[in-house]
Amino acid sequence: MSKHSAPMTRRSMMTASAALLASPALGQADPWQAVTDRARALEQCHALMISIRGSQVLAARFRGPGLDRAVPLKSVSKTIVAALTGAALDRGEIPDVTTSLSEVAPRLIPAGADPRVGTLTVENLVTMQAGLERTSGQNYGSWISSRDWVADALLRPFVAEPGGRMLYSTGSFHVLGAVLAEVGGASLLALARSRLGKPLGIEIPAWTRDPQGRYLGGNEMALTLSDMVRFGEVYLSGGVWDGARVLSSDWVAASLRARTSSPFSGLDYGYGWFLGRAGGQDYALARGYGGQVICIVPGLELSMALTSDPTRPARSQGYFGDIMRLIKEAVIPAARV
């Protein structure tokens, strides 16, 4: 023993024994190292963090910002706005998901809008089944260049019936965010900080606002990787964090029930979450441009956050497909070990 080495106490012996028991047996590959190696090989992937039953099992940065930096979530923001919708329902600010726009926020309906706009429900907006022409994709630039993002989204033509097929559109969530601010009597930022940030102990930086000063609903929010994992853990615990009720268990359960399906990925969609099944496990995804992901696997009590280059696309047949294979072929099997 080196003269600089501490003597082996009973406590240190027990700690060493526990660490040995927690590690893979000699000759047995560490499944989490395999997950790390596979994620590192994805050149767009910046960082990955995973917790199981509230304990972190993996935290790795491969490139990009440090783990403690808030990073752009892109459309993962939609899942956060969906959670804030549940918080408004829990407080009675919105009577029900079937409440219409004309009932809950008539001042948001622009003059000259199709009469059907007033009949759009909160559920139509949170599931992106409003039926209005999309403001995402090739229409995004013209939408955010408009003088009034809410009015522009609601004045677009109907291309499907309300409650029909899913039309992925940030405009639907921006209108929803405006509704939440109206009924909550505060900005979307203030609501996010008081109803999610404070109870979860996370920092929510200010983000993009529209020409009327409304915070963008459905894009441009930012969180750290650990905050993303924590948000997922709230859904795993049925809406509770650190003994305090953040969201009702009813809203959590309703959010993870399929309402429609994505024409792009084929995944089902609930209230802000994409839904699928792999390896005998149901999972839910919050997904943002470039490959920003929160994934929860309730049956394994697993919450995962993955961040990526926000300037490059992540299509279902490309990088997002790689992420899905990482989850299905590496993360879920590792969690079973």
Image (tube, grey):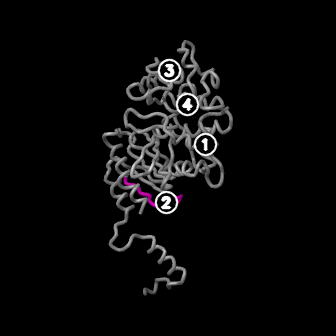
Looking at the rendered structure, the secondary structure element under dot 3 is helix
Residue range in magenta is 52-62
Q: Is residue 304 left or right of residue 243?
A: left
Residue bearing mark 4: 123
- Magenta region includes residue 314: no
Residue placed most toward the observer, 264 or 68: 264
> In the rendered view, does 152 fall on the left or right side of 262?
right
Q: Residue furthest top?
A: 112
Compare marks 3 and 1 and give the one earlier in the sequence.
3
What residue would you read off at disc 3? 152
Q: Is residue 325 left or right of residue 294?
A: left
Q: Earlier in the sequence, mark 1 or mark 2?
A: 2
The residue that mark 2 highlights is 56
Q: Residues within 10 Å of mark 2 (few under 14, many from 20)?
A: some
Give the quadrant of residue 1.
bottom left
Query: Residue 281: where, in percent of width, then height?
Result: 44, 51
Rounded to the nearest angstrom, the CA distance separating label 4 from label 2 is 34 Å
How dense is the environment of label 4, judged by Cα within 10 Å: few (below 14), some, or many (20 and up)? many
Task: Answer few, some or many: residues within 10 Å of disc 3's Cα (few below 14, many 20 plus, some between 14 and 19).
Answer: some
Determine if residue 77 is in view. no
- x, y (%) of residue 84? 59, 38
Q: Are marks 4 and 3 in contact (CB under 8 Å)?
A: no
Marks 1/2: CA–CA distance: 27 Å
**Residue that mark 1 sits on:** 250
Could you tell me the amino acid type at mark 2? Gln
Above or below, 125 relative to 249: above
| Residue 34 appears in the rendering | yes
Residue lying farthest front? 280
62 shown above or below 95:
below
Chain-order first, disc 4 or disc 1: 4
